[in-house]
Structures are given as structure tokens and as C-alpha cells.
Image: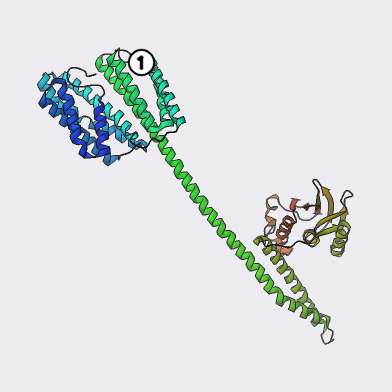
Amino acid sequence: MAIPPGYATAVWPPSGIAVAALLLGGRRFWPAVAAGSFLANLTVDGEFLASLVIAAGSTLQALAIAALMRRHIGVLERFESVDQVLRFVLLAALGTTIAPTLALGPLAAIYQMPLSDLIGNWATWWQGDACGVLIFTPLILSWSGRIGWQPRRLAEAAALGVLLLGATQIVFHGSGARTFLIVPFVVWSAFRFGQRGVTTAVAAVCAMALWYTLGIKRGPFAAEPLHDALLLLLLFVATLVFTGLVLSAVLRQLERAMGELESRVSQRTAQLEEATAVAERANEAKSQFLANMSHELRTPLNSLLILARLLADNHGGNLSPKQIKFAQTIRESGEDLLALINDLLDLAKIESGAVIALNVAPVTFRELRDDLERTFRQLANDKRLQFSITLDAALPPELRTDAGRLKQVLKNLLANAFKFTANGAVTLRIAPEAAGRVAFAVSDTGIGIAPDKQEMIFEAFRQADGSTSRQYGGTGLGLSISRGLAQLLGGELKVTSTPGQGSTFTLVLPAS
């Protein structure tokens, strides 16, 4: 493939092999580079001095390019970024000017070429060395690592090779308009096989392009004058190499970025899990503290209630009416405080996941209705509200559940309904639901709840409007406890409401 006059060839693989060898093995390989270049040139014309000078230039060129690449890029099996590809191409283009420049002297002395031929030979020599470095240095570097391909990947690589050779045959049997057929295979190689696949595919295409263009004078470049054909061939090969290396580097960057993102997500997930565990432990400690404090507070409070009741009864008859009223006030306030402590104890047990014993037994709906009627009828009369409890005719005879916990929830819902209703009615309707469930719907015509507040009210110490705690009183624990008890009984508690028109809280429990 040498192009007369002189020693130049369109692609000179040893230039790329020498650079790869010096990168992988270090500077100690330079004598092998020098000896190989000397012997190769000595076999052309047998000019000892010329071969020696050319060998010195080739060795110096390989050492310079390897040193610059090691400093500015490093020794990589594959390029990690587009910036590294650009640096490699630039170093290959500039570094390969050393050998042809030093060879001009021997060429001028041996062949006595005119200046125009020397320039043409220099350009061909530079092209051959540049293509050799661009193609074969990354090819050798990429194949220096572990392969580890699975059988399926090997079969895909074989299919790619066969199709690529077929496409190359089509390209170089026709006109230049078909050269684009090579590009999809370079893209395929980059996506599926990385830099190793790209450099191998480009080397195969380059070999066939050289053979068709310079060997048998066929293909899209053979019709041009030799100088133009070499230039087109250089541009064709350089474009394939640059496109493939850039694409594989971009894919490598994306792969690395995805790995970093997955690592960060995994690390962040671990941090969130740890934070969640800490929060759960803190919440459990808080609930345990509330439970312990509730027990400790109830003991002295019960003593105060007993003493206040004894004072209010005034068995000795030695208290004035005003003093009796003070004692009754102390007792009523103590009972309110005891109710709050009981609520806190229930909330602490529910939030901490403590075992809460359930006394499951048959409960008749008539007994439940009569109990709630006795509890709230006087309150309804005092507030001049209509109050009714209706039992659906399709209800089963009884309900198997914890009667005490069920009454606690219903009394809480009814107490809230009366608290927030100034005019109108409060009703409790008990009716069967699908799948063996029973619904207890407490409805009122009170102030209602805004849609964006309807979930918040089930949180502890929260009310739909902060001002209602001052206007209506209460701690905001009732609904939170009621939802927890509903879940404990195997059911659910939900709400529908319209501001200004009233609310309906529905407790749905399994019939058994």
C-alpha cells in the first residue's frame, strides 16, 4: 500500500501500535519501537542511514504522543468523556507531524524530490501516522482489559460483524452517496459494545476502504486523483473514528451519571430510613412517657376527687353554701382533668402500638340505643336541639365487638356533634353495609368542616380551626383516639362535611 515516491502509506498501523505499547508498558519499550521502524524501512531500499533517521523520528514521535496522552488524558481502556476524545484527536493530529518532518531530509537526499513532491509525501506520511494512531491506539487500549462477554453478546457481535462487512461491500461497490450506510453500524457498536466495538468496527471498515481505494481501484474515492482520494479517505476514517469515540464517551458519561445517581438515591434512602427509625423511636418514647405520666397523675388526682366529693357532700354540715360550691367546682374540674388524662393514656397506647385488650361480646343495638339516649337526651334538651337515634330494620340481631370501645367512639362523635351545633338536629343512624358490616352515621347541622381540613382533624391536638378551641373548648384528642379505636375494632372512621351546613362522621365496623 506504499504510495511512491518514498515510504508513505495512507494508514500506518505501527504508529498506533507503538503509542499503545508505550502507554501500556512504559518507556522501556522504546528500543523495540526503534528496532521495528529501522528494520521495516531498511527492507524498502536498504538505505541504512535513512532508515536510522526515520526510525529515530518514529520513536521520538511515539514517545512524545504517549507522554502527552499520559499527562493530559491518562491510560484508559476507554474514554470517559468527550473532552478526553477531543484531547486525544488533537494530540494525535499534532504529534504525528514529528516523524514525517524528520523524514524529509533522507527523502530529499535519496530521491532528490522537488519541493512539491516532498510536501505531498509529507502530507501522505502524516495522514498514515495520524490514521494509525487514531484507529489502532484506542483499539489496542480497549482490548487490553477483561472481555467477559456472555454467549448472547458474542452472537450479537458476530451478527454485527457480518452485517457491517456486507454494508461495506455495498458502499465500496457503488458511489459516494452510499457511505452513510456505515454510520448506523458505528452507532450500533457504540451503544452495545462501547469503545471496544467502535474501534474494531472502524478498523475493519478502514482496512476495506484502503483495499478498495488503493488496491483494486474501486469505490467512492477511487475515481478521484490520488491526492484527493487520500484526503477523502482521511476525512472518511477520521469522521468514523471521531463519531464513534464521542458517542461511546457520551454513553459512558451517562452510564457513570446513572451509577452516581443510583448511589446517591440509595444513600439518601438509607438516610431517610435511619431518620424514620429515629423518629419512630422518639415517637414511641414520647407515647411511653405520656402513658407513664398518665398513670402517675391519676393516682393523686383520684385522691383529690374523693376529697372534693366528701367536701361537697358536707356530711358534717359545717360548710357554707359558697364553700360547698367551691368543692363542687374542684370536683368538676378534677373530673375534666381525669377525662383528659384518660384520653392521653388511650392516645399513648394507640400511637405506641401497645397491646390494648378488647372485650369482644354480643351487643344488641337496642341496648346501645337506650344507653346513648340516656346519655345525650338531657344535653339535647338543654341546647334545644332535635336528637334521634334510628335503627335500620335490616340490621342483624346483635353485633359482636367491644361494647365499651364502641360506646367510647360513638359518645365522642355525638359529643362533638352537640358541641359544634347551635341550631337544628343531631342524629345517629345505624344501618347495615355490604360484606357483613354495620355503619354508625352521626350527622349534625353545625358549623361544618372545610375540605382541606377534613383529614387534619384526625391528628392529635388539632382542630379544623385554631379559634374553635377557644370558642368551643376541647383538646383535639377525641377524633384521633376515635380513629385509632375504629382501626383497632377492625373498622374505619370517615367524614363528609360542608362548611355552614353540617358534618357526618361514619363509623363502619364488621358485624362480627
Give the percent coordinates (x, y) of residue 376: 84, 63
Is 344 placed above or below 188 here? below
| Residue at 50% in and 47% down | 265
Residue 166 seen by the camera: yes
Q: Quadrant of the N terminus?
A: top left
Q: Position of residue 469 (x, y in %)?
A: 70, 63
**In the image, residue 443 above or below residue 215:** below
Q: Secondary structure at mark 1?
A: helix
Label 1 amino acid?
Answer: Phe
- Label 1 belongs to which residue? 172
Q: Residue at x 79, y 62 (%)?
A: 404
Residue 452 or residue 28, whichever sits in front = 28
| As drawn, 306 above or below 32 | below
Locate residue 39 relative to residue 484 in the image: left or right.
left
Residue at horizontal 20%, vertical 22%? Answer: 8
Q: Nearer the viewer, residue 305 or 79?
A: 79
In the image, residue 391 lies at what x, y percent?
A: 88, 53
Q: Quadrant of residue 367?
A: bottom right
Label 1 crowding class (10 Å Cα cut-off): few <14, some 14-19, many 20+?
many
Taking the image as shown, residue 416 lies to the left or right of residue 222, namely right
Give the image location of residue 247, x and y in percent.
40, 31
